[in-house]
Image: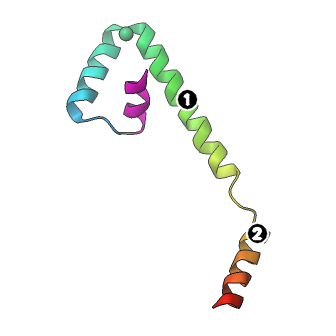
Amino acid sequence: MVLMSAAIDGELTSKEEEELFAHLEECPECRCEFQDAKKTKVIIKNRIVRVQAPQTLLESITNMTILIS
Ligand SMILES: [Zn+2]
């Protein structure tokens, strides 16, 4: 559901958000889906943090920048 990932990204207007949450209150199916989407989002965020450039790469980029400037 597109609306859900938008909600997790904080991209909904407050009215849209209100409607979504009102629906989630009465629809266990969507609530489950929403929680799953949230979990997936957290997992993706953690992965992004983990694949940050290693220190050595950062250092060689810094050295290159010094040489160029
Ligand atoms: Zn529903």
User: Does residue 33 appear to the left or right of 65 in the view shown?
Assistant: left
| Residue closer to the observer: 32 or 58 | 58
Q: Earlier in the sequence, mark 1 or mark 2?
A: 1
View quadrant of ligand 1: top left
Q: Are marks 1 and 2 in contact (CB under 8 Å)?
A: no
Side (left or right) of 44 relative to 26: right
The magenta segment: 1-9
| Residue identified by numbered label 2 | 57
Task: List x then y, in percent, for residue 50.
Answer: 69, 50
Residue 66 quadrant: bottom right
Residue at 72% over, 82% down: 64
Q: Label 2 amino acid?
A: Leu
Residue found at the very far front of the displayed protein: 68
The residue that label 1 is drawn on is 39
Three-letter residue code for mark 1: Lys
Q: Is residue 4 magenta?
A: yes
Residue for point 30% across, 35% down: 12
